Image (cartoon, rainbow, N blue to C red):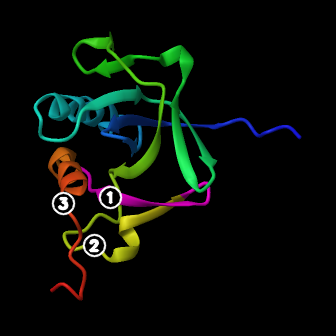
Amino acid sequence: MTEPAPRTVHASAVKVGDLAVVIRGPSGSGKSRLAWALILAGRAGQIPRAELIGDDRVFMEPDHGRLVVRRVPELAGMIEIRGLGLRQIASTAAAVAGLVVDLAASDAARMPDTASLRTEIGGVQLPRVPIGPGYDPLPLVVAALTTTCVTDEDA
């Protein structure tokens, strides 16, 4: 039996600690900028070590209940830095997805409902951060990576 090929997705991905942060959004929404900001935040010790998996295109495929994110070989280690063009940096080949960030999300809200903070990709449920247009995504993503959710029972 032939295994299906991994799905190529228009997204960027950064391995933060042991898990991948998948960054989705329309062209020009800041995927590369957020990927670079996460790498810098990792270097500054604000979050665990962060390494580029892929910028602009990545492979995603479900594997035993997890979503594996892999770099596209032709783009390995390349990231677009606005004002500098394509740059080469150290990168890692793959990681298991742990968070999805949606830039320019129409459902972003100050106090989002629980359903908007989850998404399903390839049958795998993942935490999600919807970020509205014009909002700086880095503080929200750092908060999602370094804090836990307060439930109704906790309040």
Q: Which residue is mark 3?
A: 147
Could you say where residue 25 lies in the image, as x and y percent from the top left? 40, 44
Tell whether position 123 is magenta: yes
Q: Amino acid at mark 3?
A: Thr
Q: Which residue is mark 2?
A: 112
Majority secondary structure of the magenta segment? Answer: strand
Could you say where residue 42 lies in the image, as x and y percent from the top left? 19, 33
Label 1 vs 2, first from the N-terminus: 2
How dense is the environment of label 1, judged by Cα within 10 Å: few (below 14), some, or many (20 and up)? many
Could you say where residue 60 lies in the image, as x and y percent from the top left? 57, 41
Q: Amino acid at mark 1?
A: Pro
Classify mark 1: helix, strand or loop: strand
Q: Which mark is residue 96?
A: none
- Residue 43 lies in quadrant: top left
Seen from the viewer's position, the closer of residues 124 and 49 is 49
Classify mark 3: helix, strand or loop: loop
- Residue 118 lies in quadrant: bottom left
Q: CA distance from mark 1 to mark 3?
A: 16 Å
Tell whether position 48 is magenta: no
Residue drawn at point x = 51 percent, y = 38 percent = 69
Q: CA distance from mark 1 to mark 2?
A: 9 Å
Q: CA distance from mark 2 to mark 3?
A: 16 Å
Q: Which residue is mark 1?
A: 130
Which is closer to the viewer, label 1 or label 3?
3
Q: Amino acid at mark 2?
A: Pro
Label 2 vs 3, first from the N-terminus: 2
Residue drawn at point x = 48 percent, y = 25 percent = 93
Which is closer to the viewer, label 2 or label 3?
3
Residue 134 seen in this snapshot: no
Which range is magenta? 121-133
